[in-house]
Image (cartoon, helix red, strand yellow):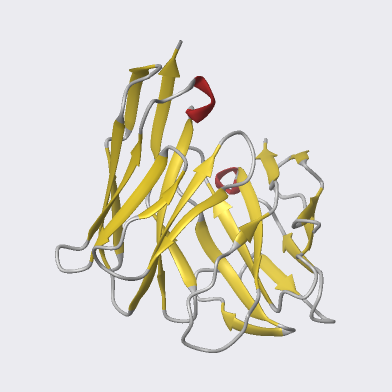
Amino acid sequence: EDKVVQSPLSLVVHEGDTVTLNCSYEVTNFRSLLWYKQEKKAPTFLFMLTSSGIEKKSGRLSSILDKKELFSILNITATQTGDSAIYLCAVQTGANNLFFGTGTRLTVIP
Amino acid sequence: EAGVAQSPRYKIIEKRQSVAFWCNPISGHATLYWYQQILGQGPKLLIQFQNNGVVDDSQLPKDRFSAERLKGVDSTLKIQPAKLEDSAVYLCASSLGGLAGLSETQYFGPGTRLLVL
């Protein structure tokens, strides 16, 4: 059975801290891994990772995939209160279906 | 570029009633998805359309849920009759639906929050 596990489930940090969110997976027919940020509305796309070892970067956020060890990390440096959200990891399989983890709830305290 | 549109944003019904949700994908996106997100969980795929055809509906509870995309553009998801455990956010997403074998980013709408009493 396909499985995507995120850790930690929740995290509280102070502004300026650096955080690392983890995502491990066991799926058949892996195609890619995606990270989304979900505030009170729809998930918004952050990164798509298809190759091992190649870091994707956008401002203070970065992510990398390890296809051998079957995991990905999402790093956020110099966190701000606006980074408070649920971060969802999803694995794309087969006909582009997304299989989501339960998410990590990040709270950034001023 | 306009995003994925959904309506209504919120709906409260009693159990055993019927409800329908509407989704209009990003213009030109051939693939449309409906997800159910229960509180505290990640979204779970219910059904995937490619144009007006169903690609995957293996997770759709077909005894009470139905969905259609008759003209290959907008789509409706219906629940009839609703149960308490159907309370969730129903998310619609779309992607280009281009060449087979290529990974595509899915873009999500704001969702419909359903509460079944």
- Classify the position of the N terminus of chain A by image quarter: bottom left
Q: Is residue B61 in view from this perspective?
A: no
The location of residue B88, given as percent across then percent down, is: 59, 44
The image quarter containing residue B56 is: bottom right
Nearest to the observer: residue A110 or residue A71: A110
Q: Going by the picture, which residue comes out furthest to the top?
A: A110
The location of residue A7, given as percent across then percent down, is: 26, 40
- In the picture shown, does residue B69 fall above or below A79? below
The image quarter containing residue A22 is: top left
Q: Residue at x 28, y 70 (%)?
A: A27
Q: Residue at x 67, y 40 (%)?
A: B116
Q: Going by the picture, which residue comes out furthest to the left?
A: A69
- In the picture shown, does residue B72 fall above or below B23? below
Q: Residue at x 32, y 22 (%)?
A: A17
Nearest to the observer: residue B46 or residue A56: A56
Q: Residue at x 48, y 82 (%)?
A: B102
Q: Is residue B69 in view from this perspective?
A: yes
